[in-house]
Image: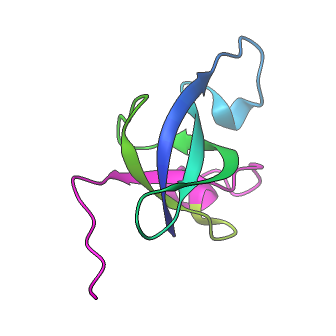
Amino acid sequence: MYLAKVIGNIVSTDKYDAYADKKLLVVQKLDLYKNPTGISTIAIDYVGAGTGDTVLVGAAPGLASTVFNTPKAPIRELIMGIADRAHVAG
């Protein structure tokens, strides 16, 4: 899992069946201090996130496929939560 900032969305009228009715968002990974790392990826939204939100992304193999009950879907990144705040001790 990692924190990311939603920086955009993907509009696709023709997509893999497992993506039907699912929102695809562009997220940029953040470091522990919420600074952008410059690494961006596409994630499926599960919680209603939008541009500008800081989100928790799960990237374990099979995670999104399990959540959406689509075992053969090519889904890797899943937005699992909107982070209200994050604190790093020290």
Residue at the (67%, 50%) spot, across then down: 38
The part of the chain drawn in magenta is 64-90
Residue placed most toward the observer, 15 or 44: 44
In the rendered image, the vertical position of residue 13 relative to residue 66, given as above or below: above
Q: Which quadrant of the structure image shows residue 88?
A: bottom left
Give the main secondary structure of the magenta stretch.
loop
Screen quadrant of the C terminus: bottom left
- Residue 44 position within the rendered picture, expressed as x and y whole percent measured from the top left: 57, 41
Residue 58 visible to an observer of this rendering: yes
Q: Is residue 23 above or below residue 72?
A: above
Task: Check if residue 73 falls in the magenta segment.
Answer: yes
Kindly identify the residue that appears in the image at 49 percent across and 52 percent down: 4
Q: Is residue 18 left or right of residue 72?
A: left
Taking the image as shown, residue 86 lies to the left or right of residue 70, namely left
On whether residue 67 falls in the magenta region, the answer is yes
Q: Is residue 16 above or below residue 82?
A: above
Task: Say which residue appears at 40% left-offset and 50% top-offset.
Answer: 55
Residue 23 visible from this viewpoint: no
Question: Residue 74 at what x, y percent from top left?
Answer: 77, 49
State the residue in front, 87 or 66.
87
Q: Residue lying furthest top in this view?
A: 13
Q: Is residue 48 left or right of residue 69?
A: left
- Answer with left or right where residue 8 lies relative to residue 46: right
